[in-house]
Image: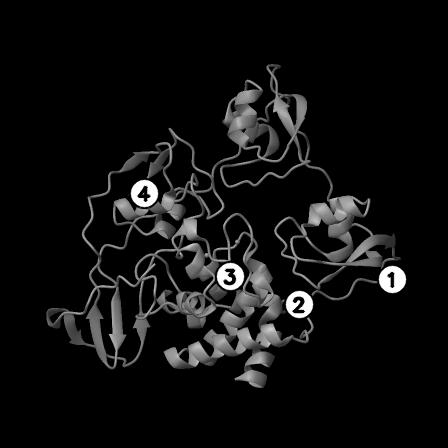
Amino acid sequence: MRHSTNRRPITAAAVVPAAVAGSIALLLSAPPATAAEPEHETRVARAPQLAIAGVAVSRVAPATAAAPATYTVQRGDTVFGIAMRYGLRTADVLALNGLTSASIIQPGQVLRLTGSAAAAPAAPATPVAASGTYTVVAGDTLSAIAKRNGVTVQALFAANGLGWSSIIYPGQKLVLPGGASAVPPAAPAAPAAPATPVAASGTYTVVAGDTLSAIAKRNGITVQTLFAANGLGWSSIIYPGQKLALAVAPVAPSPSPAPAPTTPAQEPVPTLDAEQIGHVRLIIGIGRELGVPQRGIAIALGAAMQESWLRNLSWGDRDSRGLFQQRPSAGWGTEAEVQDAARATRVFYGGPSDPNGWNTRGLLDIPGWQDMSFTQAAQAVQISAYPDRYARWETAANTWLATYG
């Protein structure tokens, strides 16, 4: 699982000849997650370059205080705010500390602001002995659970295989570490047999204000059953008018597995309603106006389909809103701005006319995006917790571009 323009004017002293006309090379920051999320990266030493109409132009970043080697998180800090304070790119700080946009930072946590990207945290040599369990309730955080049960956050992480970027949900059971001696590591378990496929029976039509947990409770089924019947997860987005299966029945597995696909599985091209077609045409029109290549417009269409089902949503995960589920707390604009479909589309594309200026990084600001896969390019902008899901809309996005473009 993405402000007003504040790009600096180009001065005559910054202009030098360029080899390729019309190319754009911008390095902007990826957005941080939310308030109290640990994410940091170091800023590029030299100013980003724009190559416009055959002239390479150096874009100078605003002056900021020199970044210290480390920073201790204070109450109320956000990764976005820390990065902006020291003139750093949020995406760089995230990588430097091994964090993601979903990570949570805590007061007293020490973040690195300079140096090379952090390696993935090493697994503990031996697991912590467990003593009891705790069931997560709405509003819980890992640090609050640890404090309430008299254990450290690190011990809670070790006992459950979690980290600062982990997400917990109501009903989840967490192991509480105890004081007994460490248990020797268990021998690697044989891979579990794949679950028996399920077939759905009975449907429910989503209405405004519905949530997956509320639908499951209202219909007397578990959230996991609703997930299994519809191929959903905790990060899935539902929308009014969508039909959900309410029950599952075992289906005999295929006699022989199909050969693994060589390309990502594609969703059937869905039939769009008037609202969705209007947003498709808006995304295409703004892409044409900005001179975005065909493939870049298709990537924008696929990203919007995955994030919002091509609807300008007034709700989403935490403070995510709009076509691209952009987050005000991550610097994408005010709540009203991220729900302005035209502005949100321009911010997704980025480039010299990005309404967010230096605050976020759009598709045109990502070096080499045209050489990336469909899903890699979309993920570079959106920074999703589920990056592989964009690929399934590539066929549909190209179909819409041919139909409505």
Front residue of 68/286: it is: 286
Q: Name the kind of residue labelled 4 in the image.
A: Ile
Which residue is under mark 3?
322
**Residue identified by numbered label 2:** 265
The residue type indicated by label 2 comes to: Ala
Residue 71 in picture, x, y percent from top left: 30, 35
Q: Secondary structure at mark 3?
A: loop
Residue 395 vertical position relative to residue 198 in the rendered view, above or below: below
Q: Which residue is labeled 4 in the image?
A: 82
Query: What residue is rendered at 53% in x and 54% in y?
Result: 1
Label 1, label 3: how far apart the Cα atoms are:
44 Å
Circle 1: residue type:
Pro
Instruction: In the rendered structure, find residue 255 and report the number of the disc placed on it.
Output: 1
> Reading the chain from its start, which is encountered first: label 2 or label 1?
1
Q: Amino acid at mark 3?
A: Gly
Which circle's residue, 1 or 4, is located before the other in the chain?
Answer: 4
The numbered mark, 4 or 3, whose residue comes first in the sequence reads: 4
